[in-house]
Image (cartoon, rainbow, N blue to C red):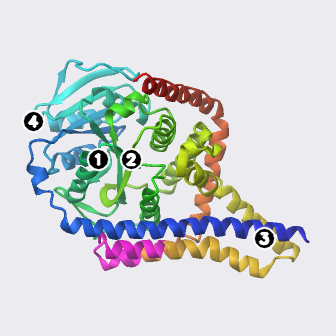
Amino acid sequence: MPWTFWFDVFFLWYFSIINGFYTFVLILGMLRTYIRRKEITVEDYTHILRSDSFPTICFIVPMYNEKENIFDTLKSILNLTYRYKRIIAVNDGSEDATMDVLIKNFELLPIPLLHSENIETAKVRKIYQSKTHPEIIVIDKEHRGKFDAINAGLNACTDPFFLVADADSFIDDPSFQALIRPIFFDEDTVGVGATIRIRNGCFFRYNQIDSKGFPDQYLSGMQGAEYLRTFYMRQGLDWVGGNFLIAGAFSVFSTPLIRKLGGFCNTAGEDVEIVVRIHRALKESKLPYKIVYLPDPVSWTEAPSTWRSLARQRIRWHFGLLESIWIHKKIHSFRPIYGLFGWIIFPFMVWGEALQPIIEIIGYIYIIITWHLGILNLPFFVLFLTLSFGFVFVYSTICLLIEALSFRCYSSFRTIILLLASCLLENIGYRQLSVLWKLAGFLRFFKKFPKVRKETKRIKQLIRDFSLEQKHR
């Protein structure tokens, strides 16, 4: 048989299996969304919002050079109807006027350090409390990164659950109320994520979003289509207990658990790593737990609006994914203790997410070479395009249809048409750039591999300490 036969078989099998998995989780995601919509019609949060028996939720808002967004973000949290909230905004050594904006608008006053620093962080310069809104605490610390800012807030947190919200994100009040049930009504819940939408072109009115102006440009439309596809996939993964990511722009975690696991670590994708660490540590310790992902669109985040900033984000994301896979590669041993997460989800992270850009670029090179040599298998070429490009369009369009029939976040006909156009156009140029950015993530991973190995050893020790603590309980 010619050598091209084996390449044809490999690519067809690879894309068929990956797309088959996507189809499976999409069906599960559709069912999950349908059931959730039925739940919303009968849920009544009025008695919850009026209750005096619920604990406080701590909002940790890490910020670095966020003078343009931080005031509006904190106001959106203050305007939430859930009464029991505390806000810890952590200034991670901003070089702009972020602290000046906070001091001026919230009348911050210095207060003494009243909490113990269980997790090591960069030096805390000062701690402030708002005179006009006493529930707001601001920690001003030296710069070390988002993970360190979250840990500084975690040190000051005295509440059973904390919520990490990006400084450029807004929280939609009606959807936020949906978080109450899984947090407070199931004791095994250790983490909650929710759907995130892009707010470029949207308006925030008091505590609700108006999305009629979305998207405001080509890039936000492309990313909006991506976000729809990604978050509906996570609804399907939620049903099999296999979510490997709670988006860093909006995530809820158990305070005691994350403290016992050593807090967030110095990785490019700290949100991926902490979720995979939870799966690994609790499965190895044989402890019951749930990580819940709600389809409700709770948070609206500012997406990159330039090609350069988008490239930096995607390179960082893929680098973070590769870091997390390397750090927790033990899960890929197919041991029964890791369950479906070890047998299906983690291998999908490796072969369907991490290595996908490598395989796709090899496919492009293979097509170019065989075309140049005059031996291109035309049926293979058509099938390759159908499986790799056509499927993405169909998948994205179905997700948009689900969105339009369920939560209706995009009520404008203009928005729906532009998103549909984005689903069609993203395969031409945008997808190829995304592949190149992911390849750049590989290069960064190899370049920083000594640091990755060092962090791997530290996280391994954190998990070992957690396991020993559970055995002695």
Query: How far apart, in angstroms, are the residues tagged by discs 3 and 4?
Result: 67 Å
In this rendering, the count of numbered labels is: 4
Q: Residues within 10 Å of mark 2 (few under 14, many from 20)?
A: some
- Of the residues tagged 1 and 3, which is closer to the observer? 1
Q: CA distance from mark 2 to mark 4?
A: 38 Å
Q: Nearer the viewer, mark 1 or mark 4?
A: 1
Q: Earlier in the sequence, mark 1 or mark 3?
A: 3
From the viewer's side, name the closer residue of 25 and 64.
Answer: 25
Amino acid beneath label 3: Asp
Percent of width and height locating residue 218: 45, 67
Among the two numbered marks 2 and 3 on one chain, the one whose residue lies closer to the N terminus: 3
Query: Does 402 appear in magenta?
Result: yes
Query: Is 366 a magenta residue?
Result: no
Task: Quickly name the residue at label 1.
Answer: 186
Does dot 1 land on a helix, a strand or a loop?
loop
| Residue designated by label 4 | 132
Residue at 32% of width from left, 76% of height from top? 405
According to the image, label 2 marks what residue? 290
Q: Is residue 94 visible?
A: no
Q: Are marks 1 and 4 in contact (CB under 8 Å)?
A: no
> Mark 4 belongs to which amino acid?
Thr
Residue denoted by label 3: 8
Q: Amino acid at mark 2?
A: Lys
Name the element at disc 3: helix
